[in-house]
Amino acid sequence: MNYIKQMNAIFTKFYKDSRLNPTHISLYFSLFQLGNLNRFPETFYINREEIMKLSKIGSKATYHRCLKQLDHWGYIKYLPSHNPYKGSKIKLLKFDTSPEQVPGQVVGQALVPYIKHDKHSKTVINIKKEEVINFFKNEFQNQLPEKQLQTEAEKFFNHNKATGWIISGNKPITDWQAAAQNWMQKALEIKAKKANKPFEKLKHLKTSRNKDYDTPL
């Protein structure tokens, strides 16, 4: 897929399509960016939480509605997954078929993730998902069941793939395994908080054994 031609063609289609609203456009470009980071494969997996965060969509219903509409209107192919441990897949339809070159633009130019490089930093944008999954299963095997570890590994990979493997301040991740350790620590903390919530809700039912029944209600 030619990045420049695809962008020019999709902007033309957006301009002519009155059915679209800003949410559709934001969602499409989030998918387009993820496809670009994966070098525009035929299809690629997506993580709902990460795509919603990237496209600034706060409602699951809005997310699914816009995703299905983009599919129905011929912008993408949405291949939903009914497996909770396996993400849905997306195919970006090509519109870069025009042979004309836009003045001032270079044909064949590809988007490179915005990551600042220096002589002392080593980026990790070429990490494979299988490598991350195996690391999670081996490193944290005593902390969560295997299926949950695979889910956390895929969330970690998809999140960092979508953001270009950078952290706050546009700094590249130099040690992804250390970043994975932090990710799992936060995931376990969230799980522990959720496990304690039922007990917190029952605190108001506790009463003192030495009640004074002479006191009026």
Image (tube, helix red, strand yellow):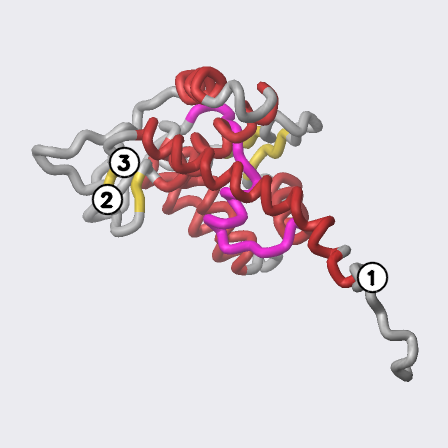
On screen, 25 above or below 155? below
Q: Is residue 190 left or right of residue 37?
A: right
Q: Nearer the viewer, mark 3 or mark 1?
A: 1
Taking the image as shown, residue 63 lies to the left or right of residue 130, namely right
Q: Alpha carbon of mark 3 to alpha carbon of mark 1: how far?
A: 56 Å
Pointers 2 and 3 in contact (C-beta within 8 Å): yes
* Residue at image mark 1: 209
Question: Where is residue 54 drawn, in percent x and y?
Answer: 46, 48
Image point 49% across, 49% down: which residue?
53
Q: As drawn, is 4 to the left or to the right of 32?
A: left
The image quadrant that residue 76 belongs to is top right
Would you call the spot at circle 2 few (<14 residues within 10 Å), some (14-19), or many (20 or more)?
some
- Foreground: 113 or 100? 113
Residue 69 inside the magenta-drawn segment: no
Residue beneath label 2, please? Answer: 171
Q: Say what amino acid the circle numbered 2 marks.
A: Lys
* For marks 3 and 1 on the same chain, the one whose residue lies earlier in the sequence: 3
Q: CA distance from mark 2 to mark 1?
A: 58 Å
Q: Can you tell which quarter of the image residue 47 is in?
A: top right
Labels 2 and 1: the sequence-earlier one: 2
Q: Which residue is denoted by mark 3 in the rendering? A: 173
* Quadrant housing the N terminus: top left
Instruction: Find the magenta span and give its range.
Output: 41-60
